[in-house]
Image (cartoon, rainbow, N blue to C red):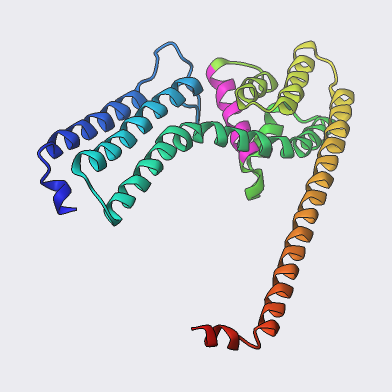
Amino acid sequence: MQDLLIVPGAPYFLGALAGCLLAGLGLTQFAPRTAPVGPDMPRLSPSARLAVGQIAGVSLAAMFLLAVVAGDVRGGVRNLLLVMAMGAYLGLGLVIPRRPIVRRQQEAAELRRLTPGMIAFVRVGLSSFESPTAIMIRYVAQTHPRLAPMRHLVAEALQIGQDRRLRPFAALAAAARPRGCRELTDVTDALAQSEAEGASADIVLAAQQATLELILQSEFKRELRRRTMYLLLMVAVSLVVGILINLLWIMTKGGAAFMQMG
């Protein structure tokens, strides 16, 4: 490592590395003025984030590789720098740019699982002749931690309704559309349409609730079968490995054969 630090070009390499890091930081902080930015929404588009991440990852990895080549580094330090180059490319080029997308996909999946319960809650409230605002306020007042994603969405819808002076279910639909959950968007659009027309949405909600519950049940069964197969495969592999180890132990007479060979 000391040889690397006294290479004539080391200050220039470090300066270029610092410049790449500052440039990448500046690009990630850039946000177009015309782009709508919502909660937990990336400031750059997914393609722009991926491009910036690729540039930053390749630049940083190239700096590590250049340090290895220019400094003629060998031994453990060489391996360390190569591993750091690979980690820099994977982290900056792939993992970090995809983090907002993965987070939004996870949120959409959680909202999808919570949609049937939300439908049932709204149907009970409407059958009790509660106002949509009262239903949404009562939903936000729940404290169960598993309902947190839907609670945040409903709370955001209440805020949107106050800021834009929208009807409650119309605000709920406006808050649900950017989340990327198609089932929830269909439900909120039906609620907003029935609210605008003054019609009852109970029949539509009942059909959507039944359909979504069937879909979730079938997906749960498929996931259960898949995990059962994985478990059986792991048990089979461990059983085969255990039998082979026992056979090897018996054939070598408790390891005595290896001791004689040594």
Residue 43 visible here: no
Q: Is residue 250 left or right of residue 45?
A: right
User: Closer to the camera, 194 or 251?
Assistant: 251
**Residue occupying the far front of the picture:** 261
**Vertical relation: 109 (above or below) 46:** below
Q: Is residue 158 magenta?
A: yes
The magenta stretch spans residue 252: no
Q: Position of residue 102 (x, y in %)?
A: 56, 35
Task: Pinpoint residue 63: horizontal percent, then vertical percent.
Answer: 27, 35
Q: Magenta region's main secondary structure?
A: helix
Tally the marks: 0
Residue range highlighted in magenta: 149-163
Residue at 70%, 22% (x, y): give it.
169
Q: Is residue 176 left or right of residue 159?
A: right
Residue 250 visible from this viewpoint: yes
194 in relation to 156, above or below: above
63 left or right, relative to 255: left
Residue 164, given in percent of the width and then of the height, sits at: 55, 15
Residue at point 80%, 14% (across, down): 198
User: Please, is residue 192 above or below residue 236 in the view?
Assistant: above
Residue pictured at 25% horizontal, 36% vertical: 66
Is residue 155 rendered to the left or right of residue 66? Answer: right
Identify which residue is drawn at 56% across, 22% down.
160
Quarter of the figure with residue 67:
top left
Position of residue 211 measured from the top left corner of the image (x, y, whole percent): 87, 31
Asked if 75 appears above or below 32 in the picture, the reply is below
